[in-house]
Amino acid sequence: MKQVVQNYRTGQLKVEELEPPALRPGGVLVRTAYSLISAGTERTIVETAQSSLVGKARGRPDLVRQVFENFKREGLTSTYEKVKAKLSQSKALGYSASGVVTAVGREVEEFRVGDPVACAGGGYASHAEVIFVPRNLCCKLPDGVSEESACYTTVGAIALQGIRQADPRLGEAVAVIGLGLVGQLTVQLLKAAGCQVLGVDIDDAACELARKSGADSVASDSASARSACEALTAGRGADCIVITAATKSSEPVELAAELARDRARVVVVGLVGMDVPRHSFFAKELELRLSRSYGPGRYDPAYEEKGSDYPIGYVRWTEKRNMEAFLRLIAERKLNTNLLTTHRFAVAQATQAYDLILNGRDRFCGVVLQYPGADQPLVNPPRDIRARAGEPGISFIGAGNFARGVLLPIVKRAEKVQLLGIGAATGLSAKNTAEQFGFSYSTTDYQEILGDENSNIVFIATRHDSHAELAAEALKRGKHVFVEKPLAITEEGLREVVAAARESDGFLMVGYNRRFAPIAQQIKTRFANRSAPMTIIYRVNAGQLPRDHWTHDPTEGGGRIIGEACHFIDFVQYLTGALPARVNAEAVPRSREGGAVDDSTVISISMTDGSVVSIVYTASGDASVAKERVEVFCDRSVATIDDFRGGTLTSDRKTTKIGRSVQDKGHAAEVTAFLAAVRGDTRPPIELESLAATTLASFAAVESAKSGVAVTIDLSSVFL
């Protein structure tokens, strides 16, 4: 299928042939009929990508801070690989489209195949022939609404939410500053609401179009805007001012204060400078409001991705309900999007559309992309799969940040292997990764990888909830499986994957990398002949994740103890050479601060050899303190590890430094050990019993923290 993409490193725009996205639970697949280029937003995105690295850094200082934080935590090499992977990606463009439903995912009841729909959302309603859209970002078209008009719905919802924030009443006077696409729709919506409207823009053509959209008066400079506002309101000033301009200048905010009556409402919708003139706002006691995109639910994963609606009695206008209201107004002939459409391009000529917007040689407002009819077959990218005999074939399911930034650079450097298939939820992500790392093919259907006889090794790097199911299915097909931690987030999933591993000709490996770190192996060797159990203290300064991060979701991520603390449980098994026998855990009570998450827990583990372990996992520490510190006490000796950069061995009052002062958490050695076992050179690096015990211990920690009772580990519960 065709999709409009831009390379973030080079800035190049092109129309790619990609695999259609995968159908996922909670959403629908849509064959696109039309999509709308949001000239203001997309122009900013495209120009940022076309700028130099310095320009990108100035445009996204938040990402620059993330890079420096990552450098301090993980060092230069790891940070370089992650930044390189990020910059090498192509990005999907577009967020407002319409089309027809072609497939319906699980848990979706309100849509049927064949329904005409309007779709919203960056990363979902892209400029592509087929799109996957979650249920709350998709709505049916009322009778009488064309698919071309419906592609305006997302931008219309943005305009409508700005008006809701302004809260104009019937007969009030509203000034709209900025008469681009959102501004024109704002004018039409305000007239439909029975308001008097003044349109302001420095472009005379935009002002003339606003007149056609229904504006009672227009102005192209500040002086004429003041005069027009005075005439329209009998000198009282505007009741509301909606700013839909896009400029770094704060002049629109300053002008809004001049046009406003006492105690008026000023709403900022567009991306403008926000140096608010305090005296003007103070003297009139103006109320400044911001409008958050297309309504409540925006930026909330529970709403947008999981389909959790807000009760209408508490949140009357969500983003989906705004979209539905906009479509109803079109159906009632109260809005006219045809008036705004100045250009139409076939999707194959999308680069010409962006050239028009970027260079501005012709006047434009609504720029629409048209797609081939549903009766025309999709063209998928050609395949050229050449498997080399005698070399293990490696395929990946999952192409997220960890796979691209950590695992794939290591696998690519491995000797005598071939990278065959890469599977991801979207064709763009799959193709990005395939091109960057040299895979033979990319796909959005993981079954294609599992059915590939040449892929005898499968790496699974998806989100946590799919690990057990995918690993079990791959093992049943005789593949060697490397699955990122955790192995499973439910006991049922763990039983399934253990049963598959016991019956498979392939073997199972989980990404517990820390046991492969050089400093860990030094300590293991030092205590190889110990005569007594160990006492181990493992402190993890994990840091906060955003409250809405998917890891916290018990059904998708399993929580941070299951999702990350399993690393440390495996590590102490490696050091002691024993399995966990009993787990007692206590969680730190949830902070009263807004946004804090209950993810700090102290875990005590009794090992089968008598060793005792304390894992202190906390998200409440300062990020400037190293993430991990390990202390091992045994045979009147002490070993320490400081964030896997260095450490010490102390015995007989003598301290020896160990480590190389460069962080090495064992990722490369872990992959090397796995591939060596695949070739038959060594045994599997971690026994299946140990993998299962680690997962059960993480479940036990969560259970103990909830119940306040110690939990005994029973391996027989999964080795049926």
Image: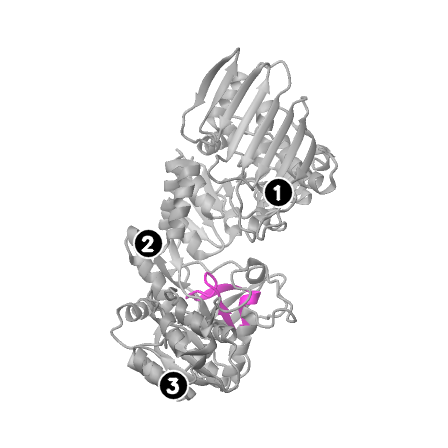
Residues at marks 1 and 2 touching, judged by CB atoms closer than 8 Å: no
Amino acid identity at mark 3: Glu
Residue at the outermost left position: 361
Magenta region, residue range: 117-139
Is residue 363 visible in the rendered structure shown here?
A: yes
Q: How far apart are marks 1 and 3 (CA)?
A: 67 Å
List x then y, in percent, for residue 519. Answer: 47, 24
- Front residue of 714/617: it is 617
List x then y, in percent, for residue 85. Answer: 38, 46
571 over 68 or under it: above or below: above
> Which residue matches tag 2?
58
Which residue is at 61% across, 32% downward?
615
Which residue is at 45% across, 62% downward?
122
> In the image, is 165 to the left or to the right of 212?
right
Is residue 140 visible in the rendered structure shown here?
A: no
Tell me, for residue 230, which label it has, or none. Answer: 3
- Front residue of 456/208: it is 208
